[in-house]
Image (spheres, rainbow, N blue to C red):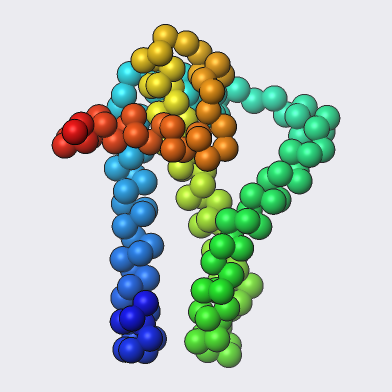
Amino acid sequence: LVLVTTHSVEWTGRIAYFTMGLPIILLFVFLGKAVSLEGSEEGIEQYIGIWDMSVLTKQGEVWSVAASQIFFSIGLTFGILTAYGSHCKRDEPAVLNTCVVAFSNSLFSFIAGFAVFAALGHLAYLEGTEVTKLPYAGFGLVFGTWPVVFNNLPGGIH
């Protein structure tokens, strides 16, 4: 923050490459390790292997929750997007930029789902239960599964 305010917009771009690039790299490291653990396939099957399209027509709240999720995750960066827009050229394709941001956000969330559910599958394997019987939901879904995978990384056990 100090570099950005003292060295202008030039540093913002450099810092953004690090603050956006590092989480993406860490996500793929986490995904690679989670998928390689025993039992991960059961978690991935729960994530994407079971299709029940009737949920979309019979349970209307699914659409509301999905829309809330995308607005929440994009809304976290609303101030940054406003600052980004103020530095764009006038003829910049705003609609295209908006679509790229929304699509990238959704893709990142989709890939993160694979990582989390693979870890859930491994956790279910360790506990000898089914993935659906694990007591994780909401923030506990991520913060309950990530330590399991991090412990399996080299140097992760302390």
The extreme left residue here reads: 155
Question: What residue do we see at 75% from left, 43% from top?
Answer: 63
Nearest to the observer: residue 118 or residue 1 = 1
Question: What residue do we see at 38% from left, 21% from top?
Answer: 122
Q: Is residue 35 above or below residue 105?
A: above
Q: Position of residue 19 (x, y in %)?
A: 35, 64
Residue 53 located left or right of residue 98: right
Question: What residue do we see at 32% from left, 89% from top?
Answer: 7
Q: Is residue 14 above or below residue 148?
A: below
Q: Position of residue 140 (x, y in %)?
A: 50, 35
Nearest to the observer: residue 96 or residue 43 = 43
Q: Position of residue 96 (x, y in %)?
A: 59, 70
Q: Is residue 149 above or below residue 2?
A: above
Residue 154 located left or right of residue 65: left
Residue 98 located left or right of residue 57: left
The extreme front residue here reads: 158
Question: What residue do we see at 38% from left, 62% from top?
Answer: 20
Q: Position of residue 156 (x, y in %)?
A: 21, 35
**Which quarter of the figure has residue 61?**
top right
**Which quarter of the figure has residue 94?**
bottom right
